Amino acid sequence: MPEPLRNLSTPASVENWQTAGFGLYVHWPFCQAKCPYCDFNSHVVANVDQSRWRAALRAEIARYGNELSGRRLDSIFFGGGTPSLMEPETVADVIEAAFSAWEPASGIEITLEANPTSAEARRFRGYADAGVNRLSIGVQSLDDAALKLLGRLHSAEEALAALKLARGIFARVSFDLIYARQHQTLEDWREELTRAIGLGPDHLSLYQLTIEDGTAFGDRLRRGRLPGLPDDDLAAEMYLLTQDICAAAGLPAYEISNHARPGFEGRHNLIYWRQGDYVGVGPGAHGRFTREGRRLATETPLQPGAWLEAVETRGSGETLRAEIGPEEQAGDYLMMSLRLAEGCDLGRLASFNAWEPDQAILETLVGEELLRLDSGRLRLTGRGRPVLNAILRELLPDG
Amino acid sequence: MRAIDRVASLHHIAPMTDLAHIRNFSIVAHIDHGKSTLADRLIQYTGAVSEREMKEQLLDAMDIERERGITIKANTVRLEYRAKDGETYVLNLIDTPGHVDFAYEVSRSMRAVEGSLLVVDATQGVEAQTLANVYQAIEADHEIVPVLNKIDLPAADPDRVREQIEDVIGIDASDAIEISAKTGQGIEDVLEAIVHRLPAPRGDRDAPLKAMLVDSWYDPYLGVVVMIRVMDGIIRKGDRILMMQTGAKYTVDKLAVLRPKMTDVAELGPGEIGVLTASIKQVRDTRVGDTITHEKRPCAAPLPGFKPAQPVVFCGLFPVDSNDFEALRDAIEKLALNDASFTYEMESSAALGFGFRCGFLGLLHLEVVRDRLEREFDIELITTAPSVVYHVHMKDGTVRELHNPADMPDPTHIDHIEEPRIKATILVPDEYLGDVLKLCQDRRGIQLDLTYAGNRAMVVYDLPLNEVVFDFYDRLKSVTKGYASFDYQLTGYRADNLVKMQILVNGEPVDALSVMVHRDRAEARGRAMVEKLKELIPRHMFKIPIQAAIGGKVIARETIAALRKDVTAKCYGGDVTRKKKLLEKQKAGKKKMRQFGKVEIPQSAFINALKMDS
């Protein structure tokens, strides 16, 4: 049984980030194929010299370990790309490096994103042996035709088998589904989601298909070759239906697109949404952490080769390190925290000493029943959740 | 007096050219028919400008003029040509504005010269705009020399175009000169024709000074520069002069001719065209068409035909950012210094805050001024619906001029309203004639004439100016695929059943969207506007009713549904920066909107709401 969520109240004596914890993000940028909807940093490469990558990731972790010594590590997250293409030895090496850099918190969460092909499923045991205790599986759909449209390499049957296998191995298993797909009706989605819930997950990430620029879908949409996407009204219906079905099944949304049985929330991602500290290693990984009272943002090169070379020759994969001022911190916190069901702690927002949301706008939004304000917390209502961006445009200060 | 004149004349440096050796002319042409290229060729041929200086078209000065291929300000150049007869002639070319908005300015320029070159593209034929200007030339008793340009192109059909000139314009085109301004072919023939076919100017050098103010502009180094054509008498540097219409008196500081570089001269005599400066503060102090004479020995009567500038189209200009109001005021004041035909007064709109109600000679003039304000002064503007000037006849017998629908008096006190009408001439290939007739009919037009010249039809319509000021020209271009040409002149006022239509957004009237409409067309117009606004106003977090109403009566209604979905599906650690930047960008986009109660209306909506698709 995982630990209960940390108490959220903010003692004045601690640094801001400490209310949300400290995590390590490891980016594995390689994929077997590029999915047409994906705008994450992923690269299709035939042969990856994993021993070189292992060494580089270890070096980066050690560098941050020196810089942020004495911390307790709450979470490690292997994201990608496709981390389930990593050799279990690589994963074990990275975890070992992390544990020698920082003392792991008791009950540390170690998540790995996995694709459910049978080849990858064969490595699940090895990941568990390396220390991974939470698997997040990219099921995406339970329908073979839809999987094909989404450019996925696995079948629904493989996905179900991988899920079953993972549950026997890992204490916690989550899976992702993509909905509001081409030609999908409300009834189609109701049926698919009901089947998914029937599989008894303790955590689900349910994403509406978003067409991003610079993806294959983005190109197709521009050329008018992506027919049958739901309009905003249908997409809104689908979103509300998702909330209802999941809540009724005991998997309420704790974030815009994430549902969990109470206590099974993904703690790593909570660090992002609660504006904790995180170190990012690997190509394209971002980090945000507090050092000597200053909050810093780090970035690394997107190209795997460029990152590797930077680490090997310069001893650091960072291409950007910048201080984030209080204004920006407050904006980031508002944007991220409103995604959570627990909402935004206005006391904490005020503690950045930057700005506060316009009172009149706040009252209007509360009056429109898009936001709720109680005991110092600002939360989205069920109506407000699907229009969060519009709400943020009202609340964020003028750039 | 006479004695002083004579003494001065003994000392002048460059002797005045005698009348027999002067030719003054303008070039009449449609856009793209090669007016500027021909002017450049003439300058080049006569050696006024070196090869290196010939890089660009010399006569059109402003960026906007160059971009749009139009001339807004008159310009002049003095050429010296040694003709085949062995004599050297002074040729003064006045480049006239080519657009109907500037018809009065054109008419004055035409009065300053004795002849015109009628340049017609031999691949295209006569266009409506050419017609209007050639009629001005005929009215000014010009000798007209037809010139067929672009003769080098395979598509050139000089015989057909010659015939068309005779049919449509009614002048003899048998000895039209065939040229290619591009290659230089026929340029000498043009120069010879100017010398031998155009009349020399007439004038009496002993008579009191009588000169026409052809145009004026502001030069950053010289101040206000005035272009003049001397009719009678002699003007010299140092003379005390009188502007007969304004009554203002000045001392001539500088007298020059443009070759095209400004070259000082001691005096200008009858038939000559040149420029002067006289410590005039503002272009506004000068009036195109005014008569310049000597203060001490004035001429008996001013030149006929003077008209003060009369704006016919009005619209509101408001800064997008209300903090820019003072900047807009400065910019408008600066611009007005150089444009006497543009009027402005402060206006306050409940919807748009403080701005200016501005009057223009026409739509092109409006666009040019707006473009210059935005470009040269870097102020983002909201332009409200253009309106014409209505004559509102009150029950008490008084008449009010209505420039702005927002100022409409209480209808119960109104007896009737008159609107300005125009005579529109449209030339169109006959395959598009049906669409053109429908368009004119839809705009409350009354057909006056319909004739054919070859496969082209010429239709003349009586139309309310109100129906034309907005998007008539755009619609005409679109229904004829750009093949129609259009011109108009104001004909007068006529009473009609006109009402003010209001637009209510979320129950609140938006004054900047009020328009005057004909009662019979109000429903259709109202429906079109609310439908358009439904597209133009983005969804909000609540639903928004949009209504068109006359008085208290709603005649059309649409509802913008509430925004239902706008949320980022995935937002994790690596997304923070990117997603927040996106929101900030969108938020900056919101700044281009105006807040009405709870509703934000994009600035472009104020103009686009009026555009009709059919």
Image: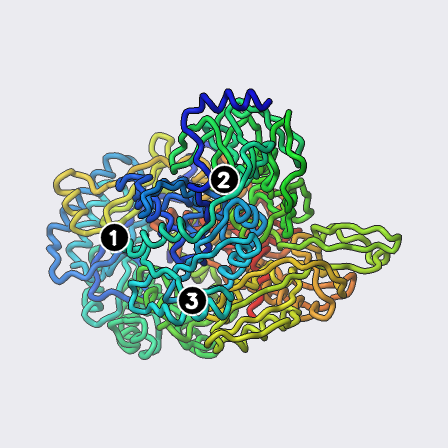
Mark 3, other Cα within 10 Å: few <14 / some 14–19 / many ≥20: many
Front position in the image: A126 or B117: B117
Residue depicted at 48% across the width and 24% down the height: B9
The subunit carrying tag 3 is B
Do the dots labelled 1 and 2 sit on one chain?
Answer: no
Q: Which residue is mark 1?
A: A27
Mark 2, other Cα within 10 Å: few <14 / some 14–19 / many ≥20: many
Q: Which residue is mark 3?
A: B125
Of callouts 2 and 3, which one flags the residue occurring earlier in the amino acid sequence?
3
Residue depicted at 66% across the width and 69% down the height: B444
Front position in the image: B430 or A83: B430
From the viewer's perspective, is B43 left or right of B294? left
Q: Secondary structure at mark 1?
A: strand
Q: Are marks 2 and 3 in contact (CB under 8 Å)?
A: no
Q: Amino acid at mark 2?
A: Gly
Mark 1, other Cα within 10 Å: few <14 / some 14–19 / many ≥20: many
Instruction: Name the residue at the right extreme.
Output: B396
Q: Secondary structure at mark 3?
A: loop
Q: How far across and down, in percent of the image, does residue B37 sit?
A: 35, 51
Q: How far across and down, in percent of the image, does residue A299 sit?
A: 28, 44
Q: Amino acid at mark 3?
A: Gly
Q: Is residue B416 visible?
A: yes
Q: Which residue is mark 2?
A: B271
The label nearer to you, 1 versus 2, is 2
Residue depicted at 11% across the width and 60% down the height: A47
The subunit carrying tag 2 is B
Q: Are marks 3 and 1 in contact (CB under 8 Å)?
A: no
> How far is disc 1 from disc 2 in space, using C-alphas?
85 Å
Front position in the image: B425 or A347: B425
The subunit carrying tag 1 is A
Residue A194 lies, with reference to residue B581, above or below; the image says: below
